[in-house]
Image: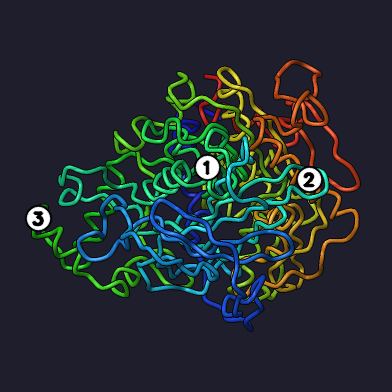
Amino acid sequence: MKKHEKTVFASSAPRKAMTRALLLGSWLAAGVLSTAAMAWDQDEEREEGPVVKTADGPVRGFVRDGVSEFLGIPYAAPPVGALRWMPPQPVEPWSEPRKATKFGHTCPQVTELGAFAGPSSLTEDCLYLNVFTTRRGARDRGNAVLVWIHGGGNIDGESSDYDASKLATGGPLGTPTVVVTLNYRLGLFGFLAHPALDSENHPFANYGILDIQAVLQWVQRNIEAFGGDPGRVALGGQSEGALDTGANLLSPLAAKLFNRALFQSAPVSGSLFYLPLSVGVTAGMGFARAAGCQGEDSAAAACLRKLSAPRILQLQGTPNASGPYVTGPMVDGTIIPIAAETAYATGQFNKMPIMGGNTQNELTFANAITEYFSGPPQIPMTAAQYEASIRSSYPPGAADAVLAEYPVSKYPSPQLASSAASTDLLLACTARHVVHLWAKSVPVYQYEFNYQNAPYYFPEMPGFVPLASHTIDLQFLFSNWHGGQLGVNSRSLNAQETMLSDEMVAAWTNFARTGNPNGSGNSPWPQFTNQSGAPAILSENVPSLSTFTDAQFAAEHHCAFWDPILGYGT
């Protein structure tokens, strides 16, 4: 490959592949399936339960299977009217016990990534959190805390899909943990840059990240009353929840609000994930023009805040597609002060123990969404179609190199060859690179979820095999996780899978408690090292956990091919 071809590849292909593959789902087509039961019925009447006094007022929860649950606690004022596209503001206090037995409203969203999220929502009054705990009141030192950010491309998802009761107990192998889940502003409501808003003398653009920081502040004020230790707080999430965890790792505004970071699919950096502010402003100006809000002054800001939620969602996208104005976390200079790549390379981030990893076959998830919306293809992807898709995504010299690196003959199907190339480029080798940067400054524990036969929550689709797909590991941590209302797990976990779940819950809760997924020591999960031949990465698999080296991971995911293209090690 010639040097100028490599340069073009590095600048354009990842963005094309990213758009096609995962985070914003901009090419999905609409579909409807029958509604499935949620993990539990939100409308079920709860008996009188425990009362906990928060700084804002008392809340009454309920007890289920030994876990006290407090659902739908407001952590900020509704971001409506003049508070839309403003930093989260304090809630109005209350004096009588507030019933906390139902989840709060889901934040506005329209695109659902197939069976991943939903139903769609128009309600901006959505800044609520939930607490799962096995104890109340800080008797001596409270339990460690895990604050969990749901995924969904920062365009969809909701905390009501996540039953954190097993994590709260620690399972049979772990330690009891206070788990906090939350809703935060998404899409254009949560991530918007526009000169009229950005000049109002408040932190701007990353409103969804500010919401997460408001939850972390709420934890510092209140978690002792729920039996939690504000000095041991892990922040983590999956997919875009991991990206948002990274935003807080980068943010000086979040310093000292948490002291462990957990990245589940996956540690990332680069301008594809944390956008330059200029990109966000261009998108925001385009949104305002499309909405009929001209100019860059206070009148434009007022016009934007008068828009109805349905109109904003109309411009945000459809059930099957995100529109051109949707962005995500941006390097705004205050909330996220500098680019992630620079911060990690120079050590300019909030230093703490970090745990992170990926699933082995992340972007078979994109294959699932494509087939979910379009229906089974008349003919499965052929070798010719695979070649055409690669050639449409990359410049000529780069396309030839990708086809040589991922020949159809080495994969069970052309579709799996395609998803392997996308997985390695966008997530696996990026994660490896970031782990190497982190390990220069802090203790790091890396994993890969390698189990290939877990239940899947999409409907059965002819010819589709998820393997170790993006999101498939969530059910091992959050009991019966099955995406949104249209997702249905094909079966319950069997005995061996339940053991893997127990091991993962132990690792996650141990990490929250000590910053080490083992609790103490270096086994079974070794601290990451790139020393030749040394165990470096935990393999989460059935029938047992194992380890492999950094070099083995790099070989499996073709990182020697992708690293120079991505600019790593140059």
Q: Which residue is mark 3?
A: 298
CB contact under 8 Å: marks 2 and 3: no
> At which x and y percent is residue 222?
47, 47
Q: Which residue is mark 1?
A: 396
> At which x and y percent is residue 399?
57, 43
- Identify which residue is drawn at 49% across, 38% down: 246
Which structural element holds mark 3? helix
Would residue 296 be seen by someone viewing this image from the given angle?
Answer: yes
Would residue 385 be seen by someone viewing this image from the given angle?
Answer: no
Scheme of image coloration: rainbow
CB contact under 8 Å: marks 3 and 1: no
Which structural element holds mark 1? helix
Name which of mark 3 and mark 1 comes first in the sequence. Answer: 3
Q: Name the quadrant containing residue 321.
A: bottom left
Front residue of 422/105: it is: 105
Please state if 417 lies on the left or on the right of 188 as rendered.
Answer: right
Q: Which mark is residue 450?
A: 2
Name which of mark 2 and mark 3 comes first in the sequence. Answer: 3
Residue density around tag 2, few if under 14, some if 14–19, many if 20 or more, within 10 Å: many
Amino acid at pointer 2: Asn
How far apart are the two marked residues, 2 and 3, measured between alpha carbons?
52 Å
- How many numbered discs? 3
Front residue of 94/192: it is: 94
Q: Is residue 440 above or below residue 537?
A: above
